[in-house]
Amino acid sequence: MSQLRAITDDPRHWLALNLWWLRWPVALLVLVMVAGLAFVVNGRSATLLLILLIALPAALIGSYAMLRWMALGFILLPLANMLVPFSIGTGSATSINATILLIMGMTGLWLFDMINHQRHIWLHKSRPILPLLLMLVFATIAFLVGQLSWFLVPGASLPAQIGGLAIFFISACAFLLAAHHFHNIRWLEWAVWVFIIVGALFVVPAALSPTLLRQVSRFIQVGSYSSQFWTWFILLTLSQAWLNHKLPKGARVALLGLCASALYIVLVKEFDWKSGWIPPLVGIAAMLVLYSWKFLALMGIGGLIALPTLIARLIAGDEYSYSTRVDAWIILGEIIKVNPVFGLGPANYYWYTPLYAIRGYAVEFNSHNQYIDLLAQIGILGTAAVLWFFVEVGWVGWRLLKVVPDGFPKAYVYGASGGFAATVAAGMLGDWFLPFVYNVGMVGMRSTILPWVFLGALVAMEQMYLRPVNGNR
């Protein structure tokens, strides 16, 4: 009787005992509905529907596997980022590509597992998580505030605003998934090696020959090789080649070659693209300083000698761009004044910019600066939450440097710490870790997802090396 009373008191027990067999049929039904919706919305041919139906069993098997080993999703992520040509939607602004779909699916499976099996929702007691959640709270408030009429002209369309808000949530989910599902260092190793191998399929042809690059580019997805890809590829290959003494010499030489190839591309072949090479160099400098403070003095001397010439060359080569960006920031300052605390909502400010002529032209434009972009979209409070989050992530990396063992873990923490510095720097250069809907759009998440995953892995390592075995929930 006591057992029956307990089951009656808590309906979840009754559901678990009697309706467990419905889980997978319901999941299959949901997938069929999604496939049907995609078919209706896009109006594609029967071929697309056939492809989707063939993909459904694979998705079902993958879901079952990821319920057991969620970190498997991060091993598949580089493939989804660079090679899977899947997209639902119109245009890059609000399209759902394979990267987004994978993170959304993993998040749904994680919530399902916590509710259905673990019986409660929990997060690690890690310092970056609170400001990350506050970022989502303030982004949601900004979205609601953005429905108000701040100017005489309308703001962004509702789908664009929802897409802008989704960028914040999907990025945060990628961080939380990585923080909670790299349960041991082996999964993280596999994820890093797959990322490097898949990235090499693009980097090596790009370094060797334009003809090879054209052939390979047919299979590499647009949006997967922005600044964040080059940054993390360079820093992770360099850190493993330099600091992972447990790797065979041949592997370390190969990694160093890949790093050199990527640096050659962004520093020589694409020198005019500042976001391609400045963030990786910032990351390398951060790694060197973390390894030994002596490098700081050397870089200081080198900077005094080379920096003035380099800055003059950069400005001379792109003076008009720099000056117009300053003009744009001044105008955006006027727009931000309307609601500085909560912002104008995701994507909205873009449609208000024609009210302020820039160099005599009434045109739409974006900020080309991640931090001004955040101020305009989610206000001072949201931007402060983002900055606080980065401070806490940097602190986690700093603490890990003192405790992680030699080999892959130590090399990874150095690489990710350099990646942290590079990602923060990239935001100043018009490259994004939170893409703007009317710039790179959601298609850019194929590469901007990388810092969120690799920085989330630092929190996972915090649980491995800095927390008691059972003290991480």
Image (tube, grey):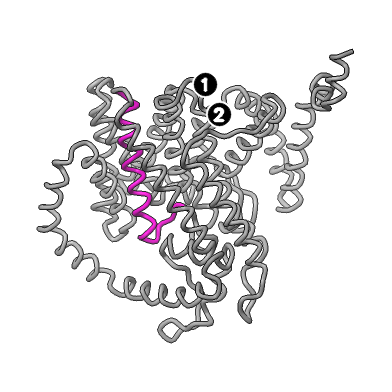
Residue 251, numbered circle: none
Q: Residues within 10 Å of mark 2 (few under 14, many from 20)?
A: few
The N terminus lies in which quarter of the figure? top right
Task: Give, as a single range, the part of the protein colored magenta.
Answer: 407-433
Q: Residues within 10 Å of mark 1 (few under 14, many from 20)?
A: few
Element under disc 1: loop
Label 1 close to label 2 by CB (< 8 Å):
yes
**Camera-nearest residue between 210 and 436:** 436
**Left or right: 215 in relation to 277:** right
**Camera-nearest residue between 286 and 311:** 286
| Residue 419 is one of the magenta-drawn residues | yes
User: Which residue is depicted at the point 21% across and 42% down?
Assistant: 289
Q: Main secondary structure of the magenta part?
A: helix
**Camera-nearest residue between 102 and 127:** 127
**Which residue does the numbered mark 1 point to in the structure image?**
470
Type of the residue with mark 2: Arg
Residue 315: name its quadrant. Answer: bottom left
**Left or right: 248 in relation to 147:** left
**Which residue does the numbered mark 2 point to in the structure image?**
473
Type of the residue with mark 1: Asn
Residue 322: name its quadrant. Answer: bottom left
User: Which residue is depicted at the point 45% across and 28% down?
Assistant: 463
Tell me where residue 353 appears, x and y as whole percent.
51, 76
Vertical order, 35 against 321 (above or below): above
Vertical order, 358 against 80 (above or below): below
User: Which residue is depicted at the point 75% across and 47% down?
Assistant: 37
**Left or right: 157 in relation to 138:** right
Q: Give how far apart the Cα atoms at labels 1 and 2 are.
A: 7 Å
